Amino acid sequence: MNTFDFGFDDSAGSAHEDPLEDLVAEYEANPSGYFDSSDLEEIASFYFEEGELEKALEVIDRLIELHPYTADAWMRRGILLNNLGRPEEALKAYEEALDINPTDTETLINLGITLDSLGRVDEALDAYHEALSINPLHGEALFNLGVTLERDERLEDAVGAFEQCADVYPEHPEVWYELGYCCDRLGENEKSIEAYDNHLDIDPYSQDAWYNRGIVLNRLGRFEEAVESYDMALAIQEEFASAYYNRGNAQANLGDLEGAIESYEQVLELEGPDAATYYNLALAYEEQDDPGAARTHYEKTLDLESNYPDAWYGLGCCLDAEEKHKEALECFRYAVNLKSNVPEFWTARADCAYKADKLDEALKSYQHAVRLDGSNEHAWTGYAETLLEKQKPEEALEAYRQALELAPESASTYFRQAKALLALGRADESIRALKTAFRLDPTKKDEFRQVYPNLYNNDRVRQLLDLDS
């Protein structure tokens, strides 16, 4: 076959505007025809770019058949086999390439990538280090070293590799992104944001970088900037459900409850019913003082995920606010059964049991709450009140003492303590407790009149408490 065409009939133009396409068309018309090594490399590259990997492999195999001692061809064969999901064969191809040229850094890097994909981490690292021993400033070797270390959860080492890569190759399209991610994982939030900003200077349309940046900003409490970051991610990819969800969280933290609700609704529109999104909607409606909507969304959460303890707790709070104490108590029971180490759940259960006149359950629940969190002043006070109702004033007095250690300026606790002291016949101490309560909160005098009408009308008590002054 004549490979060259010296014809001058160009007026109609070629069937292929690109000379490479002409070359590929010629190859496809006669694969067994003569093509030199550079032609075959170009044809293989064309197929690779088009995603036709099997065809690219056929061309490379033909090139190797013609030139079996070409290291580059063997390396390309390895890359193709790895992309075709045949990593073991790829390793053999890289070995052939390195037998021919043992100092080829590109082959060593690709060898490392394939070894990493097979989970042979130490061998992969050895390959990268060997490449770096040949060229210590090889950006791709440093980058892939970082990637392998990152996957192996050696994040601090990965950061070191990525930082070296960034020094050598600051315009690398992915190094700043990976550095930002690793710093995020290590809790180095400011460094993470700086790295994401550098990545976005290179690739401003990276929605994932804008999204991850928003997560870090949210963690730092920089909620307005986080919302702006999520907005950028959504401007690039409108159907980015996770960005809507996290934007909703940031808006809720800013107190923009309407905005948060709108963001969560977008998540539901994109992804359909979702327990976590319904739960966050319930929280937002609860913050808006809309208990009906909050209750509806807690119920939707539980319809999808019945073992969601925080949703049972939230639903219980809504029912308790509606004074449906028995139904609320059942919800709190579910919550503590599903997650038994949350003091707030036990305190809510205890409060509700007390209101439902289930004093034994209230007592045990308060005990559990203070055992989990000894600094829970509300639980200590509730515990004391319940003990007093159970005719255990001595134990109640100790619980009040614990509450006052935590909140020594609590007029209500002094006021209630007076009742326990009175029940024990310690009238003088009871009077002192009441005086302290009145000093801390003069409105307690009106409460005293309602709670202890007989004492209030006793002239001696009125004199001791200075009620007439």
Image: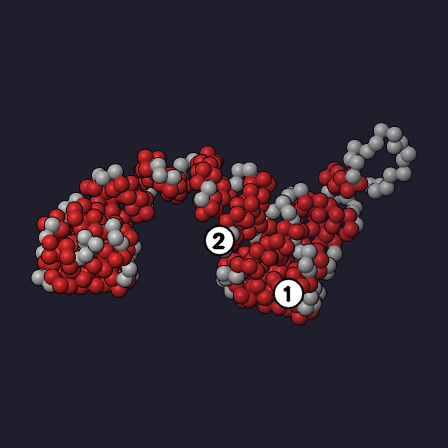
The residue to which callout 2 is attached is: 221
In the displayed structure, would residue 291 be above or below residue 385? above
- Where residue 1 sits in the image (x, y, percent)? 82, 41
What is the number of the mark on residue 407? none
- Where residue 174 sits in the image (x, y, percent)? 62, 54
Left or right placement of residue 263 versus residue 168 in this view: left
| Residue at figure coordinates x 25%, y 42% from the top left | 320
The residue to which callout 1 is attached is: 164
C-alpha distance separating marks 2 and 1: 30 Å
Crowding at dot 2, Cα within 10 Å, few <14 / some 14-19 / many 20+, comes out as some
Q: Could you say which is closer to the camera, residue 325 or residue 196?
A: 325
Q: How many marks do you count on the picture?
A: 2
For badge 2, the amino acid type reads Gly
For badge 1, the amino acid type reads Gln
Left or right placement of residue 106 versus residue 448 in this view: right
Where is the C terminus found, in terms of image quarters?
bottom left
**Residue at the extreme top:** 12
The secondary structure type at the circle numbered 1 is helix
The secondary structure type at the circle numbered 2 is loop
Q: Could you say which is closer to the camera, residue 323 or residue 192?
A: 323
Structure colour scheme: secondary structure
In the displayed structure, would residue 124 be above or below residue 86? below
| Residue at figure coordinates x 83%, y 42% from the top left | 3
Q: Could you say which is closer to the camera, residue 378 or residue 249?
A: 378
Crowding at dot 1, Cα within 10 Å, few <14 / some 14-19 / many 20+, comes out as many
Left or right placement of residue 380 versus residue 184 in this view: left
**Residue at the extreme bottom:** 133
